[in-house]
């Protein structure tokens, strides 16, 4: 009798595992189909414009949409500013303004950890407490006395037991009155929902923000364009882009003389901190301290990433 019961439960467990594997396989298939559709759209766009003259291309809606997105992301320079790479080589490292010795940072917020804490470790080694959030992992791959980990995901309007808004995270950690926080965010496309809901007052608590934007080139073809442009305009009210780097893991979109990456790492500085120091950018991206995200693939050249390019 006991063997029959044991056999029955084993069959139940085996069935549950099979159903779980089937669900994971279906999700993988759907993701691959989405990637193939995006690739076909980009390829079709490249072929469509390959034989047309530049002036004709500039009159197309596609070009105008690309130009609009790029204009909202174009970086400026900071007079006498020095940039530094924070984090490991290749994927996981970000370029930031090196003002850590002159500015007192209250705390750092890090969203999207996975198996890489190199940015967090570099920040922690500067004596800054790092509050780290990722609801997809059980624990950190490495520990540091300045690390504070929460198995919580970041959200904008979506609700969930393990999801908090940025404002809720700040309040729970006692940072509501802090005015000099920094943040790194790589949350696989959820950033648009998050930034859509963040108030200007909460954004203004962060002196520097490093974020990887997803689905930029895809937005040219779908309904996300208005969401993306609205979010970028909102961020630009309080912060200014000062560095951009294209993640080479996915193909960018070329339209005429413009290139817009599918994945773009952007460093923002709070405007009120540098309002007298912002000057026209003269750098070309990637810079000398940038590195490709994938070791075996070259970086994507963005030039000065501006619609109005200098002569």
Image (cartoon, rainbow, N blue to C red):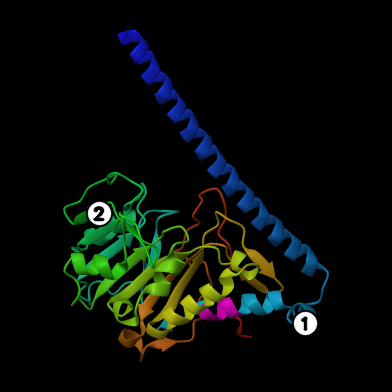
Please, is residue 239 above or below residue 297 in the view?
Answer: below
For the residue carrying disc 1, how many other residues have a C-alpha within 10 Å: few (<14), some (14-19), or many (20+)?
few
Rate crowding at label 2 as few (under 14), some (14 to 19) or many (20 or more) other CA atoms within 10 Å: some
The residue segment tinted magenta is: 68-72
Residue 301: x, y in percent?
59, 66
Q: Which residue is mark 1?
A: 55
2 vs 1, front mark: 2
Question: Is 70 covered by the magenta stretch?
Answer: yes
Q: Earlier in the sequence, mark 2 or mark 1?
A: 1
Q: Provide residue 213's location: percent of width, then percent of height.
A: 48, 65
Name of the residue lying farthest toward the bottom: 276
Let me know if residue 38 is in the magenta part. no
Q: What residue did someone put label 2 on?
A: 150
Kindly report the secondary structure that dominates the magenta region of the rendered protein. helix
Q: Is residue 78 left or right of residue 161?
A: right
Q: In the displayed structure, would residue 116 be above or below residue 119? A: above
Identify the image quadrant of residue 274. bottom left
Is disc 2 placed on a helix, strand or loop? strand
Name the side, left or right, on which 226 lies relative to 121: right
Q: Is residue 304 among the parts visible in the rendering? A: no
Total marks placed: 2
Report the residue at 32% width, 66% height from top: 165
Q: Quadrant of residue 198?
A: bottom left
Compare residues 94 and 70 and report the one nearer the observer. Answer: 70
- Quadrant of residue 132 in the image? bottom left
Q: Quadrant of the N terminus?
A: top left
Residue 305 vertical position relative to residue 161 in the rendered view, above or below = below
Residue 286's x, y, as percent? 52, 66
Q: Determine whether, in the image, residue 277 is placed left or right of residue 73.
A: left
Q: Position of residue 203 (x, y in %)?
A: 33, 77
Is residue 61 among what the camera can see?
A: yes
Residue visible at 27% across and 55% down? 121
């Amino acid at each position: 009798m006991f063997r029959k019961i044991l056999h029955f439960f084993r069959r139940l467990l085996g069935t549950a595992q099979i159903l779980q594997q089937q669900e994971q396989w279906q999700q993988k298939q759907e993701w691959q189909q989405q990637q193939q559709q995006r690739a076909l759209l980009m390829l079709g766009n490249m072929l469509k414009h390959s034989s047309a003259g530049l002036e004709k291309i500039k009159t197309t809606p596609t070009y105008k949409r690309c130009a609009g997105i790029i204009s909202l992301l174009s970086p400026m320079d900071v007079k006498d500013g020095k940039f530094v790479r924070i984090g490991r080589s290749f994927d996981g490292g970000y370029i930031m303004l090196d003002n850590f010795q002159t500015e007192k940072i209250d705390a750092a917020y890090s969203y999207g950890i996975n198996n890489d804490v190199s940015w967090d470790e570099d920040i922690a080694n500067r004596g800054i407490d790092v509050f780290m959030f990722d609801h997809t992992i059980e624990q950190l791959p490495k520990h540091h006395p300045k690390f504070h980990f929460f198995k919580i995901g970041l959200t904008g309007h979506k609700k969930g037991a393990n999801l908090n808004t940025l404002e809720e995270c700040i309040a729970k950690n006692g940072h509501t009155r802090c005015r000099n926080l920094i943040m790194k965010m790589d949350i696989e496309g959820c950033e648009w929902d998050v930034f859509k809901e963040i108030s200007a007052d909460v954004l203004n608590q962060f002196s520097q923000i490093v974020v990887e934007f997803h689905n930029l080139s895809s937005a040219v073809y779908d309904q996300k364009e208005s969401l993306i442009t609205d979010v970028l305009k909102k961020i630009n009210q309080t912060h200014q882009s000062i560095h951009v780097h294209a993640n080479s893991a996915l193909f960018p979109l070329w339209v005429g003389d413009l290139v817009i990456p599918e994945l773009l790492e952007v460093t923002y500085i709070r405007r009120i901190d540098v309002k007298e120091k912002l000057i026209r950018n003269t750098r070309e991206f990637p810079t000398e301290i940038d590195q490709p995200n994938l070791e075996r693939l070259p970086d994507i050249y963005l030039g000065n990433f501006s619609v109005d390019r200098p002569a």
